[in-house]
Amino acid sequence: MSKVLDVIIVGAGASGLACAYFLKTNNVTIIDKYEGAKKLAMTGNNRCNITNILPLEDFLLGYGRDGQFLRNTFDNFFRDELLSWLKRLGVETHEENGKIFLKNMSSKEFSKLLKSKVETRIKIKKFEPVISIKKEGDLFIVQTAKNVYKTLNLVLAAGSKSYPQTGSDGFGYSLAKQLGHTVVDLEPIEVPFCSKDKLDHLRGISLKDISVTLKLGNKRITEKGDVLFTHFGLSGPVILKLSANSFKEAEISIKLLDSPKYTVEKLHFYKGKTKNYLSKFLPKRLTELSPHKELQAANLNKKQLKDIESFLSNFCIKVTKCGFKRAFVTNGGVSIKEINPKTFESKIMKNLFFCGEIVDIQGSVGGFNLQYAFSSGYTVASTINNIIS
């Protein structure tokens, strides 16, 4: 059996790499199911939305009712500290509509840089799945497909269940359960919507800054933003935001035009077919779905005009969530009731720590989740540094 390590980190994603970087000891091993940071390399369509400019109190609201759990960690490492650290790494950022993105490199380049910085001190055991973990006395015994390791401090940073092809396939939850922790029910969020409605002919159409309403029984949730029609359904920022709501099947209503009534009122003055008039405002493939599209606009009666107005203001599609394979974030995870918010140490087992997506903490779209990943990694590293100093 190998020597006793100060720290083993399971997972080389954003939080695991941040934790490793800030550890003062070099007697550390990181174990990853794949090569590490695959999900980070894909973040934000290769642009990587690192954080945003909201003040702390508003930022905490981005995590819903669990936001207060993060107050302590953000008090120690928040946006200014994150951006300062990135600058030291040679990473430049810029603000765009209140969000902070990478400026001088892509997400893929950033993930490579972060791994390389960590690997100057710490070995990353790549393509080495963890099979089991147990604790014997003061030591954690970590069994992988290739070796057995033992450590005084264990960090589970194995990610969530979203984008399983990156290694974030939910195996970390089984490890947490092996060590006595509760895992809150899992559900994909920040995920596109799939639909059985025939939408393939709309594939590639993008609508900018429109209102979309999610209908859940008698409940209505409306958000505004960009929507993209895909071969499987719908995506885009507003869809990902609405996916934070829990449901199995639902209906969404898209307001295709901001002022449909104003548009319809002018139909009587148009000499030509209805669809030709609507194509002034909408992609032609969408106008083909309009009621009375072939009729002469000037001859439409009141009911027909009302039908068209309804189409423009209430374009309905039945949807489901597309599942974990397309999800950016997983709702659920290791219960925060069993984790110390000041240290991210387990309340159940001494010297066991959690950071990143494995924990039942989820932020809104817009840099919340990466800020949390880096901040939680820093918190765990700082706690362990105090233990072993």
Image: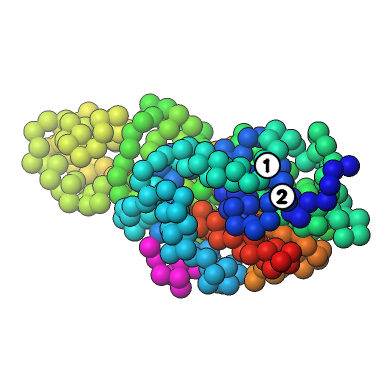
The quarter of the picture where the N terminus appears is top right
- The one nearer the camera, 18 or 346, is 18
Residue 323 visible to the viewer: no
- Percent x, y for residue 378? 59, 60
Task: Name the mark on residue 72.
Answer: none
Q: CA distance from mark 1 to mark 2?
A: 7 Å
Determine the main secondary structure of the stretch shown in magenta. Answer: helix
Q: Which residue is mark 1?
A: 123
Q: Which residue is mark 2?
A: 28
Residue type for callout 1: Lys
Q: Residue at x 70, y 33 (%)?
A: 127
Labels 1 and 2 touching (C-beta < 8 A): yes
Query: Which stretch did the figure color magenta?
Result: 53-61
Residue type for callout 2: Val
The quarter of the picture where the C terminus appears is bottom right
Q: Residue at x 68, y 64 (%)?
A: 385
Q: Is residue 294 on the magenta stretch?
A: no
- The one nearer the camera, 313 or 185, is 185
Q: Residue at x 60, y 49 (%)?
A: 17
Residue 128 in the image: above or below residue 217: above
Q: Residue furthest right?
A: 137
Q: Residue furthest top?
A: 201
- Percent x, y for residue 200? 42, 27
